[in-house]
Image (cartoon, rainbow, N blue to C red):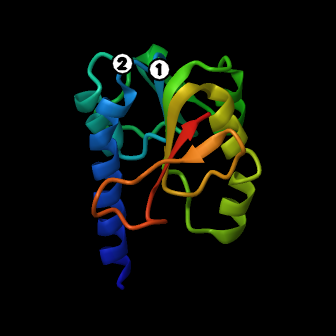
Amino acid sequence: MSRLDSFIRRMQAQRDILNALPRRLDGVPGLVLEFGLGSARTYDHLRGLLPDRRIVVFESVVVEGVRPRPALEDFVVGHLRDTAAAWPDGCAALVHADIETGDEAGDAELLTWLPALAARLLVPGGYAVSGGALPHPDLAPEPLPPGVAEGRYHVLRRV
């Protein structure tokens, strides 16, 4: 499979999973935490899916010209490991993290802290959605929407 085909399949999986979230999040209190703004495609999609939820975005650097951009109070700039760690336990109904780079060493380092951070920030019953696996005893895998291949994208629920 070409890298382009792989990217398209990953984006389709992400979209299908995100589109299923409003039903799953019904009755689950908390914020939406988006780890990484990138080109703001996912942030923009989440705003449309969850218009009544506050969405807080964490990004390591500000890239000028990226739109839409969150309001200043909902845009946290700095290293994710430090900035998100300052947020209170159980503040989020959803943590979305599609921040893997494909660099084996960097992604392995990410797994040393990201799963525990996501689990800590989620309310019981909240969801972690990620491009990479988030192995943690407090995060249980959830069924994927039809058409999403196992391992392509991940949905976990905070137990």
Quick one: 78 or 51, which is closer to the camera? Answer: 51
Q: Say what secondary structure mark 1 lies in.
A: strand
Q: Residue at x 58, y 39 (%)?
A: 60
Identify the residue position indicated by label 1 in the image.
Answer: 31
Q: Residue at x 35, y 68 (%)?
A: 7
User: In the displayed structure, would residue 152 be above or below residue 42?
Assistant: below
User: In the displayed structure, would residue 88 be above or below residue 2?
Assistant: above
- Residue 65 visible within the image: no
Quadrant for residue 132, please give it: bottom right
> Callout 2: 10 Å neighbours few (<14), some, many (20+)?
some
Q: Tag on residue 53? A: 2
Marks 2/1 in contact by CB < 8 Å: the verdict is: yes
Q: Is residue 148 left or right of residue 117?
A: left
Which quadrant is home to the C terminus? top right
Q: Is residue 158 left or right of residue 98?
A: right
The kind of residue tagged 1 is: Leu
The kind of residue tagged 2 is: Arg
User: In the displayed structure, would residue 28 be above or below residue 155?
Assistant: above
Q: CA distance from mark 2 to mark 1?
A: 6 Å
Q: Say what secondary structure mark 2 lies in.
A: loop
Residue 115 position in % (x across, y down): 67, 45
